Amino acid sequence: MLRLGVNIDHVATLRQARYRGFDNGEPCPIDAVRQVEAAGAHGITAHLREDRRHILDRDIWGIREALQTRLNFEMANTPEMIDIALRLKPEAVCLVPENRAEVTTEGGLDVAGQVDAIAAAAATLGQAGIEVSLFIDPDPVQIEATAATGSPFIELHTGAYAEGYSDETKRAAELERLAKVAKQAKSLGLGVNAGHGLNYENTRGIFAVPHLNELNIGHSIVSRAVTVGLGQAVREMLELMEGYPQAE
Ligand code: PXP
C-alpha cells in the first residue's frame, strides 16, 4: 500500500502570517494533526527550520505528544537539529537542504558533495532508532551517494515532475527519470518515498514510478482544506492514492 504522510508546515505558515511572536494563534498545527490522523493519513511530516518561519519548537513537541501515527521530522543536518531529533525521537527524520532565501525546500540535498557529514548524521540518528531518509533529486549520482551514507531511505524530489506536468513531453521525461532512479534505489536496498508539488491532478501520474513506500504531501492538501475541510481533503487524497501497483 502506498502510504500518505501529510506535511502540515503550511498550517503553521498561515498562523504565522497573523500571529508571529504570539504564544498561540490559529490555525493550530496540533488540531490539524488530530484531524489528519482521524481522516486516515499514515503519518505527519513537519519541518522545523533554522529560522522557525512556520513550525515552532512548541509545535513540534506538541505534535510529538498528540501524534498517534508516525512523525517524519524534516530538518537540516545541523548540530542543533540533530540534538532536537535525538530528544524528540521521531519515527523518521528526512534530511533536507535549507536556504534562508527559499520559500519552501526548493532542491534536493547534495549528498554526493557531503557523504561523510551525512553518513555521520545517519549513524547517530540510526543508532537512536530513527529511520533516516535523504531528500534528493532523481539523479543516479545522488542515489549512489545515499547508499554510501548508510541511510535506509530516499525521498525523491518530485518538484520537476510537478512543474512539468502540463507539458506532456516534460511529464513523460520526468516520470522516466523518477522510475529509473526508483529501480536503482531498490536494487541498492534503499526504501523509496517521494514528495514535493504533488496535488489532486498530478498524484496519480506518480503510479508510473515503481517501489514507492510513501508520498509526503502538504501544500495541496492544506489548500484544499480551505474549501472542503482538512479531513475531507485528506480522504480525497487517500482515495486518489488507492490502487498503486505493487512492483515485484
Ligand atoms: N517533502 C519534502 C522533503 C518537503 O520539504 C516538502 C515541503 O516543501 C514536501 C515533501 C511537501 O511538498 P508540498 O508542500 O509541495 O506538497
Image (tube, rainbow, N blue to C red):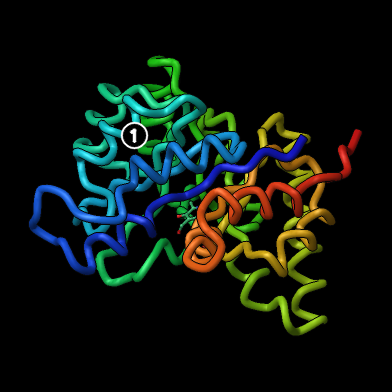
Task: Give the residue at x 84% y 56%.
Answer: 208
Which amino acid lies under the numbered mark 1 shown in the image of this protein? Ile
Q: Is residue 190 left or right of residue 173?
A: left
Q: In this view, does 170 lie to the left or right of 191?
A: right
Task: Give the residue at x 66% y 33%.
Answer: 190
Residue 85, position as x, y percentages in the image: 30, 29
Task: Give the residue at x 44% y 23%.
Answer: 130
In which quadrant is the C terminus drawn?
A: top right
Residue ID for mark 1: 63
Outermost residue, front side = 228
Foreground: 78 or 166?
Answer: 166
Residue 47, position as x, y percentages in the image: 36, 47
Foreground: 181 or 23?
Answer: 23
In which quadrant is the N terminus drawn?
A: top right
Foreground: 52 or 229?
Answer: 229
User: Could you tell me how many numbered marks the image carries?
Assistant: 1
Outermost residue, bottom side = 167
Task: Give the residue at x 52% y 68%.
Answer: 227
Helix, strand or loop at mark 1: helix
Tell me if mark 1 has few (under 14), some (14-19) or many (20+) residues whose alpha carbon lies within 10 angstroms of its own.
Answer: many
Q: In which quarter of the image is residue 65?
A: top left
Q: Quadrant of residue 192?
A: top right
Foreground: 157 or 112?
Answer: 157
Outermost residue, right side = 248
CB of mark 1 near ligand 1 (< 8 Å): no
Residue 124, position as x, y percentages in the image: 36, 22
Residue 90, position as x, y percentages in the image: 40, 27
Q: In this view, does 22 lie to the left or right of 49?
A: left
